Image: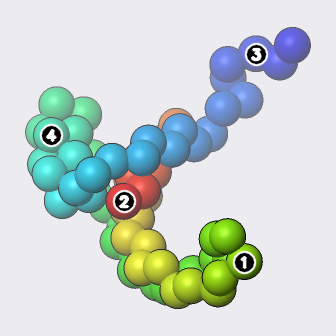
């Protein structure tokens, strides 16, 4: 199994990206790159467009991704 020093990004699914950013920004001194887009999915044979919001920390070496 690989070592933890190879991990460069951790993704967290959250209910509210803005709230999660506020909670993580102060203690860890993180700043964010915000993205919004729509993704196409098929659920029970029905195609839908779903809004996707996410933010990725600028700081590393391990980056935090928040996905709403």
Q: Is residue 29 above or below residue 47?
A: above
How many numbered discs?
4
Residue shown at the point (64%, 85%) measured from the top left:
47
Closer to the chain start, of discs 3 and 1, is: 3
* Separation of residues labelled 4 and 3 (CA atoms): 28 Å
Q: Which residue is mark 3?
A: 3
Q: Which residue is mark 2?
A: 68
Q: Is residue 30 above or below residue 4?
A: below
Closer to the chain start, of discs 3 and 2, is: 3
The picture places residue 36, in percent across and down from the top left corner, at 40, 80
Q: Which residue is mark 4?
A: 23
* Disc 2 crowd, CA 10 A, few/some/many (<14, 14-19, 20+): some
* Disc 4 crowd, CA 10 A, few/some/many (<14, 14-19, 20+): few
Residue shown at the point (48%, 79%) measured from the top left:
50
Q: Which residue is mark 1?
A: 45
Q: Is residue 57 above or below residue 23?
A: below
Closest to the observer, 37 or 46 = 46
The picture places residue 10, in percent across and down from the top left corner, at 53, 39
Closest to the observer, 44 or 20 = 44
């Amino acid at each position: 199994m690989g070592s933890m020093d190879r991990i460069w990004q951790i993704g967290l699914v959250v209910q509210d990206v803005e709230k999660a950013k506020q909670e993580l920004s102060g203690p860890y001194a993180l700043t964010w790159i915000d993205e919004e887009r729509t993704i196409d999915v098929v659920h029970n044979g029905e195609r839908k467009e779903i809004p996707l919001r996410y933010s990725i920390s600028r700081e590393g070496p391990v980056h935090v991704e928040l996905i709403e």
